[in-house]
Image (spheres, helix red, strand yellow):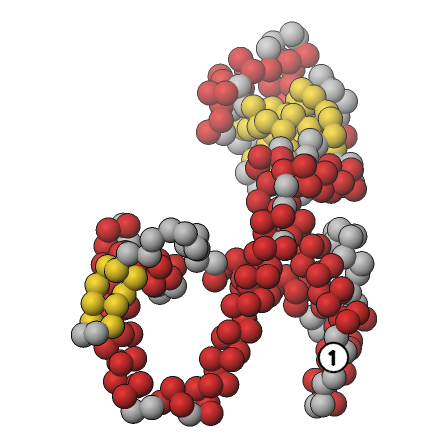
Amino acid sequence: MLSYNKLAVMALATFVALQAPVYAEDKPDAVVAKVGDLEIHQSELDLAVANLDPQLAQLPDDQKKVAALSAAIDVKLLAGDAAAEKLDQTSEFKKRIQYLSDRELHNAYFKKHVVDTVTDDEVKARYDKEVAALPKQEEVHARHILVKTEQEAKDVIKQLDGGKDFAELAKEKSTDPNKADGGDLGYFTKGRMVKEFEDAAFSLEKGTYTKTPVKTDFGFHVIKVEDKRDAPPPPLDQVKDQVRQLVMRDKYLALLSKAKETSKVDIMDETLRKGYDDANKQQAPATQPQQ
């Protein structure tokens, strides 16, 4: 069962996908083509570009504009014929136009009261809140030396015990592709390595290495932990778009909640009503982040 939050997020995502360039009221809307007595304006071309088939949307900009213009011309050609046959006067057409009009009004309201109101300060505050709620996760910075046999691994440990530098020994003995980097694996959290390797690495103290070979499907490892720390959160610049989506979602849910206080929702179909009510019961307060 979808929760109301998830339904709202899906609606939000649909809005974002349907966004198109918006012309300011005082900006000239040039005519780019004519089909008989019908004109195609720049704003229509922009809408056509924004709504191209995903495959055509991958074309270079100049080709994309040609494809969009071709589609707009096709629409005008048949739209004129459809109007001549009074297809725009049918009840089915009018119902569809009313739905499309309501959807575009919804989108315009969403843009004005949600998209255009999100500030960098709000995004930063939400990022800080999400980071503060993240559970601590340990990560280690490790090196390793990979060899084929247990005896080779024991010989490596013996040389380390004798004072040999780990990185230099990795360059000399390891069969792993990262041997040129002294066996450096960088930082990693649990779940990134095979279990035997991971168990050994996380059990070591900083600056120590395994005193017995660690066997995995890759061979035999000697592991050294260079550092241990709590994994840092992703930087704001890296997740800014996702955090902005969270801020927009909460603003959107707040708008819907306020609207429901003044407009009663009646659903006649019992099954649909139950599904809608169940989804609404799962709605968390709009000000609370969803983990």
Residue at the far front: name it. Answer: 26
User: Residue 43 appears at what percent x and percent y?
Assistant: 35, 59
Residue that label 1 marks: 265
Count the marks: 1
User: Residue 24 appears at what percent x and percent y?
Assistant: 43, 52
Viewer-nearest residue: 20 or 214: 20
| Above or below: residue 23 compared with residue 234 | below
Looking at the image, can residue 226 be seen? yes
Viewer-nearest residue: 119 or 279: 119
Residue at the far left: name it. Answer: 36
Q: Residues within 10 Å of mark 1 (few under 14, many from 20)?
A: few
Which residue is depicted at the point 41% across and 52% down?
Answer: 26
Q: Is residue 75 left or right of residue 24?
A: left
Disc 1 on helix, strand or loop? loop
User: Residue 70 appears at what percent x and percent y?
Assistant: 23, 66
Q: Is residue 289 left or right of residue 248?
A: right
Viewer-nearest residue: 250 or 242: 250
Identify the amino acid type marked 1.
Val
Q: Indicate the quadrant where residue 253 lies.
A: bottom right
Residue at the far top: name it. Answer: 163
| Above or below: residue 264 compared with residue 178 | below
User: Residue 227 appears at what percent x and percent y?
Assistant: 70, 21
Which residue is depicted at the point 27% across and 50% down?
Answer: 60
Looking at the image, can residue 209 be seen? no
Which residue is depicted at the point 46% across and 29% down?
Answer: 177
| Above or below: residue 72 compared with residue 270 | above
Viewer-nearest residue: 148 or 249: 249
Q: Indicate the quadrant where residue 46 lies.
A: bottom left
The quadrant in which the N terminus is found is bottom right
